[in-house]
Amino acid sequence: MKKVLFLMSVALLIPGMLLAQATLGVYHEGSLSINPPGAGVPFTAYLYVFTDHQVSGIQYMLETPSDPSHAQFNYVSVSYPQYMSLYMGDPWTGHEIVYYPAISTYPNGYAILAEYTFVAMMDCEDMYDYMINVVGDPNGISDPAFPDPDLYGTYPPDMYHFGVTGMSSVVCPLGTPTENESWGAVKSMYK
């Protein structure tokens, strides 16, 4: 019986491990939602990768579907980790970055690949739910093995490709107002 349970758990675990894919997103203070400090005030956000690989290269693009010309929201600068060795393009039109030595995601499973200084050109009341999507770089090299053939990373030693799922960030999320309550107060509502 123990062997059967072991074999079943391995049979379920291996496909899950094989289907696990890296994610890439723009994070501000650990969240995919960003509330700028105000119109014209610069603030910092980070490009994070979540993967179990070291990262020697990444290609991606940031897309703002509601504002393709970036009149409402733009970046002031991009900075890279000290071990960045080459970059081409920019985040809005397609960005390829090479790291040497490779960036390690050990022990947490994530790493910062770039730091952005963004600025919102208007207050949140005028740009609720402004989306920043991480998508493939249309100017990069395509790899048809991945769902988004233009969005992937490479890892050492032989620079094998790994698929990446692009995340979406929300600037000025239009949220539902809530009150802070203790768990006991919430439970008491259902007595």
Image: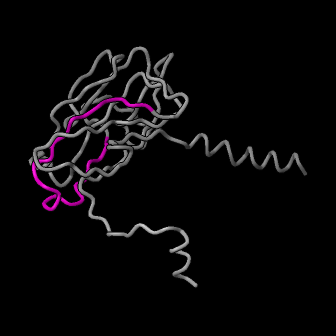
Q: Confirm whether the magenta stretch covers residue 125.
A: yes
Residue at (42% x, 21% y) in the render = 56
Residue 60 left/right relative to 104: left
Residue at (88% x, 48% y) in the render = 2
Specify the farthest residue to the bottom: 191
The magenta segment is 111-135
From the top left corner, tell me how far across and down residue 139 is, in percent: 24, 31
Q: Quadrant of residue 91?
A: top left
Task: Tell me if residue 154 comes above or below residue 14 in the rendering.
Answer: above
Q: Between 170 and 125, which is closer to the camera in this rendering?
A: 125
Q: Confirm whether the magenta stretch covers residue 175.
A: no
From the top left corner, tell me how far across and down residue 183 is, in percent: 53, 68
Residue 47 left/right relative to 44: right
Residue at (43% x, 31% y) in the render = 111
Residue 172 left/right relative to 73: right
From the top left corner, tell me how far across and down residue 36 is, in percent: 21, 49
Instruction: Count the numbered circles shown.
Output: 0
Q: Main secondary structure of the magenta part?
A: strand
Q: What's the coloring here?
A: one colour
Quadrant of the snapshot with the C terminus: bottom right
Q: Between 63 and 27, which is closer to the camera in this rendering?
A: 27
Task: Tell me if residue 116 comes above or below residue 179 in the rendering.
Answer: above
Residue at (59% x, 40% y) in the render = 18
From the top left corner, tell me how far across and down residue 186 is, in percent: 51, 74
